[in-house]
């Protein structure tokens, strides 16, 4: 298995990544590395290239050019070696509506080939308080309940790398806070690497120690939330975000 | 290898859960084959009193309609479960698991086999009750006919899925319509010799035409045509290879164009 020299310390390594659709450059030559055990954010407005980047990291989208390594594994040529150790959640994908919560999670547990499937299902049911929802059809759940189930799905295989696209989109503040609590706890307990794409600044400030600002397919700035605040002379990441969005020179 | 088997089994379980979740859907699997069988059974009874040819080949039309339904159901059995994944926007989740595209295709084929067996099996059982016609009287050759039509149906199903994966649910109508393009040339109810000479060549490039010719030879002349059998086997290998190749190509194009996350209603 081809593995980079920095595989031990780096969870995600991206070099000169491009994605173009005809004349549109969705991602334009980005490079970054995310160390293991870090929660990192990809922050940017609509069309900045966040979802495109995540999709390429997952292998759902083929890059036009560039290199991606996750856990030291080349995602273009050997992604099936990395996928069992990763997972993903997004409000833009869904689970089958006509299956119950339990059936959906059971199918995914089987797809990941979990050894102690029933025990793991019990664990996630407990963590995400799914017992009452277990026999309900997924399609009948509220947005908050669906997010809990999706999150449970994304943690079934106890991923070392978790990619999340707007994990709390469409949730009320209380539900969103609970999701953030669960995420923090998972990260703390397992030392997993989390990369989340978001334009929810509060979430990013609360969860992430490292922030990459994306605009028009480029990473235009990067740093810890406190560093970014200092650099832009602002008090919130939202203000930084607006400064970057307004700056035509970037 | 075992992990691959586990993933295929996981998807089969997923489709079984889906089938179990709605009894009207389960009933629907048998509904159309049964309606077709009753209709053609009555036509067969009427014609038997007016035509020596039909009278001598009792049940030929019922056998033909049941076998035609094997082909139709096999194709739908592949394409409809795939559409379910698109309706529920689940492809993005599926393809971030270690699931390989060929494993998804294999699971679709297996579930198609089950759906076809339920649908056509129920109709075949009713044919015995209503018309005292048992398609099972064909014996072992029936297994060959069934398998050959299943494989052709799978191949066309994979081609339909490939088109839908490439061009989206706008191409969904093909799943219902495409198989009927094969019907006139398959010689379901009449021999291929009825067709104009130039069309006979086209017809014989389809496995189904050899199956129905073979069925008529069995029912009317009581012999199993090895020529038609091996022709259908060889053609099916080509059809299945093309079906799989198109499916894998469409999956790659979907990855290139970012369609896997966008697919849905």
Image (spheres, coloured by chain):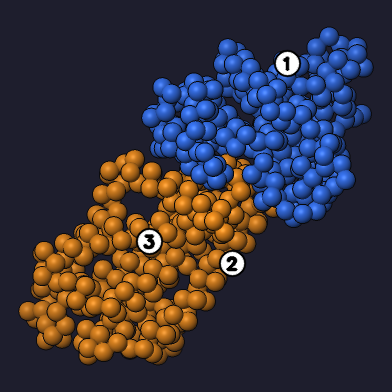
User: With respect to residue A123, does B31 lie above or below?
Assistant: below
Task: Name the residue tied to disc 2.
Answer: B245
Q: Are marks 1 and 3 in contact (CB under 8 Å)?
A: no
Q: Position of residue A163 (x, y in %)?
A: 69, 34
- Chain in blue? A
Which one is in front, B190 or A37? Answer: A37
Q: Secondary structure at mark 3?
A: helix
Tell which subunit mark 3 falls on.
B
Q: Quadrant of residue B198?
A: bottom left
Which one is in front, B222 or B13? Answer: B13
User: With respect to residue A160, does A207 lie above or below?
Assistant: above
Q: Spatial distance from mark 1 to mark 2, Cα to Cα?
A: 48 Å
Q: Residue at x 14, y 67 (%)?
A: B128
Sequence-earlier tag: 2 or 3: 3
Let me know if marks 2 and 3 both belong to one chain: yes
Question: With B87 as the anchor, is B70 left or right in this view?
Answer: left
As drawn, the label of residue B113 is 3
Task: Name the residue tied to disc 1.
Answer: A206
Q: Are marks 2 and 3 in contact (CB under 8 Å)?
A: no
Q: Spatial distance from mark 1 to mark 3, Cα to Cα?
A: 51 Å
Q: Secondary structure at mark 1?
A: helix
Q: Colour of chain B?
A: orange
Question: With A22 as the anchor, is B46 left or right in this view?
Answer: left
């Amino acid at each position: 298995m081809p593995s980079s020299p920095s595989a031990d310390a780096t969870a995600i390594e991206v070099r000169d990544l491009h994605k173009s659709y005809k004349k549109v450059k969705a991602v334009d030559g980005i490079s970054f590395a995310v160390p293991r055990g870090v929660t990192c954010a990809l922050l940017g407005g609509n069309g900045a290239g966040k979802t495109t980047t995540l999709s390429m990291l997952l292998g759902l989208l083929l890059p036009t050019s560039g290199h991606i390594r996750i856990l030291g594994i080349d995602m273009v040529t050997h992604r099936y070696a990395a996928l069992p150790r990763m997972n993903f959640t997004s409000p833009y994908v869904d689970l089958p509506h006509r299956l119950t919560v339990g059936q959906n999670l059971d199918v995914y547990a089987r797809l990941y080939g979990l050894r102690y499937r029933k025990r793991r299902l019990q664990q996630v049911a407990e963590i995400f308080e799914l017992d009452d929802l277990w026999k309900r059809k997924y399609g009948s759940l509220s947005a908050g309940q669906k997010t809990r189930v999706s999150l449970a799905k994304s943690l079934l295989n106890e991923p070392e790398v978790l990619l999340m696209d707007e994990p709390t989109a469409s949730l009320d503040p209380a539900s969103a806070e609970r999701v953030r609590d669960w995420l923090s706890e998972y990260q703390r307990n397992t030392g997993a690497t989390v990369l989340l794409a978001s334009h929810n600044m509060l979430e990013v400030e609360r969860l992430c120690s490292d922030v990459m600002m994306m605009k028009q397919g480029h990473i235009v700035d990067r740093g810890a939330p406190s560093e970014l605040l200092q650099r832009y002379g602002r008090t919130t990441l939202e203000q930084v975000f607006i400064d970057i969005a307004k700056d035509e020179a970037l | 290898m075992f992990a691959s088997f586990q993933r295929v089994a996981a998807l089969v379980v997923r489709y079984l859960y889906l089938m179990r979740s709605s009894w009207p859907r389960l009933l629907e699997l048998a509904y159309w084959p049964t309606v077709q069988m009753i209709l053609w059974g009555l036509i067969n009874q009427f014609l038997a009193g007016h035509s020596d040819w039909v009278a001598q080949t009792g049940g030929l039309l019922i056998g033909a309609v049941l076998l035609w339904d094997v082909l139709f159901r096999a194709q739908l059995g592949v394409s409809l479960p795939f559409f379910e994944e698109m309706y529920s926007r689940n492809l993005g989740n599926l393809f971030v698991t270690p699931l390989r595209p060929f494993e998804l295709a294999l699971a679709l084929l297996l579930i198609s086999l089950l759906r076809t067996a339920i649908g056509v099996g129920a109709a075949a059982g009713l044919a015995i009750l209503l018309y005292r016609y048992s398609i099972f009287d064909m014996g072992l050759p029936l297994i060959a006919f069934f398998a050959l039509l299943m494989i052709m149906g799978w191949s066309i199903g994979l081609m339909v899925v490939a088109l839908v994966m490439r061009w989206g649910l706008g191409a969904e109508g093909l799943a219902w319509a495409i198989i009927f393009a094969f019907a006139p040339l398959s010689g379901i109810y009449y021999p291929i010799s009825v067709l104009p000479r130039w069309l006979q060549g086209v017809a014989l490039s389809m496995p189904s035409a050899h199956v129905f010719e073979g069925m008529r030879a069995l029912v009317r002349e009581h012999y199993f045509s090895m020529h038609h059998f091996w022709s259908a086997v060889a053609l099916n290998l080509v059809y299945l290879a093309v079906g799989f190749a198109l499916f894998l190509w469409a999956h790659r194009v979907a990855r290139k164009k970012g369609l896997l996350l966008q697919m849905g209603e």
